[in-house]
Amino acid sequence: VSLTTAQIREKYLQFFEGKGHLRLPSYSTVAPDPTTLFTVAGMQPFKDQFMGAPAVFDGVANKRVTTAQKCLRIGDIENVGRTLRHCSLLEMLGNFSFGDYFKQESLTWAWEFLTSPEWLGLDRARLYVTIYEEDEEAFRIWTEVNGLPADHILRFGADENFWPADAPKEGPNGPCGPCSEIFYDRGPKYGNDTWAEYAETRESARFLEIWNNVFPQFDRQDPLPDGTPVLKDLPFKNIDTGMGLERIATVVQDVYDFYSNDVFAPIVAKVAELSGQAYEGPQSVSHRVVAEHIRSVSMVIADGSVPSNTGRGYVVRKILRRACRHAYLLGLREPSLFKLVPIVAERMGDAYPELRENLAKIEATVQSEEERFLKTLEGGIQRLGGLLSGMERGAVLSGQDAFVLYDTYGFPVDLTKEIAEEYGITVDEAGYAESLENAQEIARAGSKYGKSELFGGNQEALEGLARTEFVGYDELSVEADVV
Ligand code: ATP
Ligand code: MG
Ligand code: MG
Ligand code: MG
């Protein structure tokens, strides 16, 4: 391993300290303001400073700050296992300017950190960027100052290169601005697509987004009565950047995905050991989901969130149950996830001592939730056994039955299929998908995720969903195990 995750984190913070930034510890995963349940970005604890509040931290005044912030993105929970670039918990490396330096410094320092042999020393030829369509200044800095070839640059509208993306349209209110994102070309091993094609596809296993440089210069306010958006200039221009530590570690270590880097590999290995199932083939999606989710859950429990049916607790429960289902698919029939917690604490505990301080509490919380959920699953097995034993070989279990098993007992359809097979019975998968789709539509009414998951909207949606014991509609599909 060239640089460990811990070394990359440390280098980043040191680099920006060298540029006059004050290093602050990560804030909690519990969101600092009520617009989201969990902290979703490194900038979130600094919204007041972007709006003009004094940049004074524990008595130290500094308009430049750098952090490694732990973030939890609810909208990405179901991406885990589906894409290879999303974690539910991520560490965001950030440098922030509150009315101090602006675009030129931000983009040249990012370039220096990534490419200088003294820092990460990445190959310049593999770096690509996107800019906001109207941002000539960013284009000039990338090409003339950093020397990036023009054909390494794509221009996008607000959907990609404004943060938050919906700010110009439906909101949320608050600091916002155009951004420039940096991508790394992981090479032909990951696909034959080209950067020019990315303009159309906006999805690539090969070109990995690693770092977002945001230029918050507007305060988005309520639109005029006729709907015209209101973007007022902030008292000064700010910088907000976020680089995903898990992603950059994967690039620097030149490993296939997160799960082979120095943080995740030992957790994945333990999942394989506990289950006796090798980390290979289609089932490996389960190793990954279990490893990723136990890390998230450990961190949010360390920060005081515990499984429940509302708010943050509901999200903790959802992540944990998703991990339980995958553990079950790997053949684990006894609580086992809690045995992974010490490895998470060992891998992450230097940077996040709260994991070690709360180790016993995290283990106990995970174990008791596992016990509860395994009972629910057993209930499903009995119900399914009852249904199947009343049917003839060659018959088809209805999609609605499969859906009820999923919805009420948290029973993955793959497992239903597997058990039905033993009775010579197949499952109406199209019917199942239809029932699932209907239920999702109901859940979606009144809840709006999408890009506005980041600020606003989702709290209400989550509390609405949490009124029932909702196990989650996240589909479990091995075919989807591609980026
Ligand atoms: P993507 O388009 O891949 O979903 P994003 O545009 O939503 O990423 P940003 O909101 O710009 O991400 O966050 C800044 C950086 O944080 C990203 O460039 C990426 O490196 C990292 N990041 C974002 N979401 C995740 C995630 N779910 N897992 C790991 N890293 C992430
Ligand atoms: Mg995203
Ligand atoms: Mg993106
Ligand atoms: Mg982005």
Image (cartoon, grey):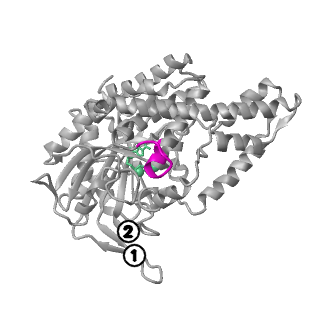
The numbered dot on residue 173 is 2
Q: Which residues are magenta?
A: 306-316
Q: Is residue 210 visible?
A: no
Looking at the image, is 192 positioned above or below residue 260? Answer: below
Residue 402 versus residue 250: which sits nearer the camera?
402
Residue 106: percent from the left, percent from the top? 25, 52
Residue 257: percent from the left, percent from the top? 45, 31
Looking at the image, is 332 positioned above or below residue 64? Answer: above
Residue at image position (54%, 37%) is: 321
In the image: residue 329, left or right of residue 455:
right
Mark before the other along the chain sequence, 2 or 1: 2
Identify the image quadrant of the C terminus: top right
Residue at image position (32%, 69%) is: 219
Residue at image position (35%, 29%) is: 360
Asked where in the image residue 294 lies, by quadrant, the reply is: top left
In the image: residue 217, left or right of residue 461:
left
